[in-house]
Structures are given as C-alpha cells and as structure tokens.
Amino acid sequence: MTDEKRHFDFSSLEPFRRYVPLAAWTIVVLLFLYIPLKIIGYDYLPGDDALRHAAYAVSGKTWPDILVLGPAFHFDPNWGWHRLLGKIHLWTNWDADRLVVFSVVMLFLVSNGAVVACLRRPEAWLAAFILLCQPQVSDLTERFLLGRPFVLSIAAMAVILFAWQRHGSSPPKWQVVVWMTPLIAAAVFLHGVWYLWALLVASFFLAGQFRWCFLLAVSWILGTFLGSALTGHPVESIQQAVQLALRAVGMHQTQLTMVSELKPSGGEIFPILLLGGVIVLRQLAKLKAPPLVRHPAFWLAVIGWGLGCETFRFWEDWGLPALAILIASDLQLFFESRFAADSFQRLALVCGLALTMCAVTTNDFNSRWTNHLAWRYLTPDQPEIAGWLPDKGGIFYTVDQSLFYQTFFKNPNGDWRYIMGFESTLMPDEDFKVYHDVVWNFGDAKAYKPWVDKMRPEDRLVIRGGSANVPPIPQLEWNHGVGDIWIGRLPRPVENGTAPPTVPATAPREGSTH
C-alpha cells in the first residue's frame, strides 16, 4: 500500500518515508511528557491521597503517630509506595510539594508508556484516550493525574491484556507466569490492593480463555504473596486489606458518609454508546478482531460497569481502562488497514490526534486543574491562627476529610493526631458514630457533643462554615482565621479567672496560600 496510489503525490518526500515511524513515536512520547508538565504548570495539586502519600513520606512517622485508629488498622496499607517516596525524599531532600509533582508526572508517564509500549500504533491509544476524556464517562485524564499508585495496577492490567491479544489464538505457554507474577507482585506491593485482580481473572474466564485464566490465577496468587512478603507482613497485609475494604463499604448506613469513589455510578449510558461504536466499526471496516465475547477487555468493561452501579470505583479503575484498551485495540487494526506504517498520512493523523489530545486534556475545564488555588491552609506561621492549632499530643477533630488532606500535607511534622484520616472507617467505632451523626444531621452542632465532652486543652475541633457565623457550640471558644474554617478549643482561663471571648470573624483574604 502506497500513499501515491491512494491520496496525494509525495514523491518529493520519498527519502524521508523511513523516518515516519520514528517521528510518530517521538510525537507520542513528547506528548506524554508535555501533558503532565503543562498541567503542573497551573500549580495543580490532586485533592486527596497524593497529598497524604507525600506528607507521610516526609514526616518519617507511622500512621498511629498521625491518626487516631480503630481496631482494624495494624500497619501501613501503602507500605511499598511510601517506602519508595521516602527513599526519594532522603535522596533528593524534596518536600511534600515536590513529591506530589513527582508522583503526578511519573505515574502518568509509566501508565501511558506501558500501554503504548504494547501497541504497534501508539496513535490508537491517543484516539481512545480522546474518546474517554469526556465528563459523561469519567475523565480518564483526571484519573491518570491523581498521583496515586492505583494507576500502576491499571498499567499492569493493560500489559496483560495486550499480551493476550498479541498471542492471538495460540495457547499461552507456562512461561507467561514468569513475567506476569512479578508484574502483579509490583502492583500489589506499591498499590496495596490484591483482591481486585479477581476481576481480571473472571474476565478471562467469561471470555472462554481458560488456559490464560488458569495461568493468570496462578500468577495472581504467587504475585499477591510475593508483593505482600516484600512489606514484611505477608499474611497480615493480605488480611488487613480485606478487613479495611469490608469496613469501608459495610459501616456506612447511608451514602452521605461515603467518599465519592464508593458511591454508585448511576449507570452511565455513554460507555454503552462507545461500545456500540466499536461494533459498528468492526462491521464497516471488516476488522480481523477477536469477537467481543471472546475478548477479556470487553468482559472486564462489562463487569466494571455493572459493579460500578454499586461502587463507582469498579468502573473508574477497572471498567473504564478496560474499555479504553478494547477501543485502542480495534483502532489499531483500523489504522493498520488504512495507513501504511511509513505513510505520510499516518504522520498527519498522529499530529492531529496529538494536538487534539493536548487540547482536551490540558484545558482547565470547570477549573479542574486550578480549583485548589482557592484552598486555605492551616499552618502555624499564620498570625491569625497562632496558638490555635492543636498543641503537642493533641487531637485534630473534624468530619471534613479535605481538612485532613490539606492540613497534613502542609504540616507533615505536626505534633498532633487526626481523628479523620484518608478513610473515615479507620477511626475507632465510637468516633465513627459521632462522624456519622454529624454528617447525617448535616452538621448539627448537637451531634458534636461526644467529641466536645472528651476534648482536652490540647485538642481542637475544626469546622467549615460561613465566615460570619460562629459555630453554635458555646462550650468552646472559636477562632476564624482563614477562609471558611473555624477552630474551637476549650476556654483558657485568664488572670481574673474568666475565659477569653471568641475571636471575631475576619474578612477572608484574597488569593491563595499555595
């Protein structure tokens, strides 16, 4: 197949044809470097776990030194990832901000690099990524830029699915266990979640790929034990992961107290339309692709979509990437049937897709990359809150998870502990009941009473509210220092034996402390 017969006359460019594949790969690699760096240029910060991962690595503490923990927590569930970040902190002396930047950029590169390394036509992944960068689906860009190690599990899953596709109809040899086992072990060690790999095993079973299913199951079992053994707690880490997951989904009586990832998805229709588009493309282009019912990525997308109707994270972390892999696989076959590898039309296609992907991923739609600029941090160097952060050995009481992430991120060496951590069910059961009652009653001040009754002088109760309204908890004195954050503490006696008055609200300052 030549360009001249099908489209235009490129005879003058003929000497440069052999460089087209290299140019295509160079464009894709540079694109994957540019996107995270461009977004970091907005001073972007993820909103949740990436902050506490970085702060934990800098703090040098253990979680019992940071959180008030319940009976199910025994040791760090992200031990491998924190170990890696801790080593980087020691080698480079990077603070928490730089570790977050490292996490966001490195994980984006690793995840996308692993996918395109398995493709003959990397532009197929660009096209699939563009289709799934839509708010109706769950923006794949934001998921890949959260700076959280779950994307390593996605990358490992993608490598296995593409390896299956590359084998075609030939049965796999037992040697695949040799490379799948360490791949899964690395994901388990760094991510800390092993049980969700059962979804991929089930997908191969439903696709009728029984030999692959068996070898993958063996690799999963071996990889789980190997990855867990690297933490130094081979059995306990496996047990704790299940216990924490059961508490995270089983202790909530209502969705109000759940994080958004654990809530139902609602059953989005757009992924079904995309799947219908895949079927139409297969028929019109007569692609030599495996039937959908024989494709594990199809079944993983179906399982993720179905389970996502109960817990959204099944769709976001497994179903959505599987759909992207399925679409990229078919688009690769389509591009190969239409464009020669050294075709200038192919190079034009790569350039167009790269520009489109750059446009749809780096634009600041709905302030997704800059909404953190409005965050107001609590730090001891702020005159407005001097003496109002918890004293040494104190407890930071709050029902607002964002206050934990942001305050711990800016104060990794703070001499206090947080009642609310990265998962509400980690706290003791009696404290979780208080948290549940506060959220269930939409922040009613009376629901805070059990915490207020047991507060000590070194403890603080931190609440978000209107800047002009003092929280109606008269047992505490209050300070409004930054943004909409109020800090309450037990009244401190003065020389005449009376308690000082509540610090009046001050007008919010312009700008951001970040």
Image (cartoon, rainbow, N blue to C red):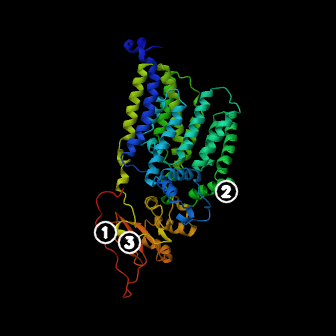
Please give the residue where the numbered disc 1 appears in the rendered image: 468
Q: Tag 1: residue type?
A: Ala
The residue pinned by badge 3 equals: 471
Disc 2 marks which residue?
236
Quarter of the image containing the C terminus? bottom left
Q: Disc 2 marks which amino acid?
A: Glu
Local SS, label 2:
helix
- Where residue 322 sits: x, y (%)? 54, 38
- Vertical arrangement, residue 291 with respect to residue 442, above or below: above
Answer yes or no: is residue 61 visible. yes
Total number of numbered discs in the rendering? 3
Within 10 Å of disc 2 (Cα), the crowding (few <14, some 14-19, many 20+) is some
Q: Earlier in the sequence, mark 3 or mark 2?
A: 2
Q: Nearer the viewer, mark 2 or mark 1?
A: 2
Between 359 and 262, which is closer to the camera in this rendering? 359
Name the residue at 49% across, 29% down: 122
Would you identify the image quadrant in which residue 173 lies? top right
Q: Is residue 373 above or below residue 497?
A: above
Secondary-structure class at tag 3 = loop
Residue 473, by quadrant, is bottom left
Q: CA distance from mark 2 to mark 1?
A: 49 Å
Q: Mark 3: which amino acid?
A: Pro
Q: Is residue 8 visible?
A: no
Residue 478, given in percent of the width and then of the height, sits at 37, 73
- In percent of width and height, residue 33 lies at 43, 38
